[in-house]
Image (cartoon, rainbow, N blue to C red):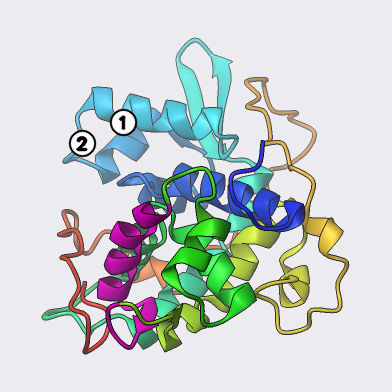
Amino acid sequence: MSLTGLPADNDADIARVSEALAMITPRWNVRILLALSGPPLRYSEIANSFSWLHNGQMHLKLRSLCDAGLVQRSEHDARNVTYGHTGRATSLLPVLPLIVSWAEQYLEPPEGEQSAIEQIEDSLTLLTRRHAAAILWTLKGRGETSGRALAARAIPTQQWTNIYPPLRQMVADGLVDTDGKGQPYRLSGAGEGLAPVLAALSTWSAGQPLTQAIRHPVWGQDRTADSGAWASHQARTPTTRTRPDPAVPTQPAQRPKWQDTDLFSHPAPARPAPALPSGGIRR
C-alpha cells in the first residue's frame, strides 16, 4: 500500500528510510551502537557505560536493537553472553559522521561544548518529525510547491490541510522555507544540505554499498542510476544467537575518529528546543 502520492520507487524509498530512522533515533540507541563498535561486550560492560539507565531499560534497548537486526546476542555458555554488531550495524557507522558534518554546518551553535553524539541525536530528532521524510522527498523532487499540491503528494490519504502543522514545524526547524502564509514552500539551504545524509541512509536501508549513495535518484549528485535499484524492500538482517565459530577470528570494527574522546562526554543531553523561523536551526 502506497504511503505517499509519489512514484512507487520514491514511496518505497521513503518507507525504508523512515524505518531505518525509527531503528536508530530512540534515545540512547546510537550511543549503544557506538559502544558496541569494537569487540563484543558482556552486558555488565555495556551497562557500566550507561550508569544512568536502569537494568530494565538497558535490556529493552538491547532487545529492540537485536530485533532490528543491528545487534547480535551470542550465548557462549550459561554465564558468558556477549553483544556485538551485526554486519548491518557495522555498515551504518560511516553514515554517522555525515550527520555530524551536517549538524556542524547547519545547526545553531550550542551554548556550550557539545559532543558528536549529541549532534547526531539533535539531527535525528528533526528528521523524524511527522511526515518529514515525505515532505523532504516531495520538495526535493518538485521544487517550490504550494501547500495543497505538496499535500497531494506527501499525505494523499488525509485532508489536505493536515499538511500545515508539520510544514510549520519544518519551517521552524529551518529545513523548509516560504515567503509567507499562502506562499509556496521550498527546501531551505539546510534542507538541501541533507542530501548526503538522506542518500546514505537510503542506500544503507536498501542494503547497497554506500559508494552508491552518490547515484541516488533523488538525493545523489550523479542521478544516472536506475531508480528501480531503490524500489525493492531490503529485509532486516535476522538476529542470530549461535555460538561464534572459534576458527574464524573476530575482527573488531574500526571506531570513528570522532568517537574516541567524546562519546560519553555528556551523559544526559537536553533534547532540541523548538526552533525559530530564522537565524538557523535551533538545538
Residue at x-position 64% and y-position 69%: 199
Question: Would you say residue 162 sits in the magenta stretch?
Answer: yes
Q: Which residue is mark 1?
A: 58
The residue type indicated by label 2 comes to Leu
Whichever of callouts 1 and 2 sits on the residue coming sooner in the sequence is 2
Query: In which quadrant of the rendered view does residue 172 lie?
Result: bottom left
Question: Would you say residue 258 sits in the magenta stretch?
Answer: no
Give the left or right position of residue 183, taking residue 13 as reference: left
Residue 252 seen in this snapshot: no
Query: In which quadrant of the rendered view does residue 45 lie?
Result: top left
Q: Residues within 10 Å of mark 1 (few under 14, many from 20)?
A: many
Whether the residues at callouts 1 and 2 have beta carbons within 8 Å, the answer is yes
Q: Which residues are magenta?
A: 160-181
Q: CA distance from mark 1 to mark 2?
A: 6 Å
Residue 31 seen in this snapshot: yes
Q: Which residue is mark 2?
A: 53
Q: Position of residue 114 (x, y in %)?
A: 22, 74
Residue at x-position 45% and y-position 14%: 79
Element on which disc 2 rests: loop
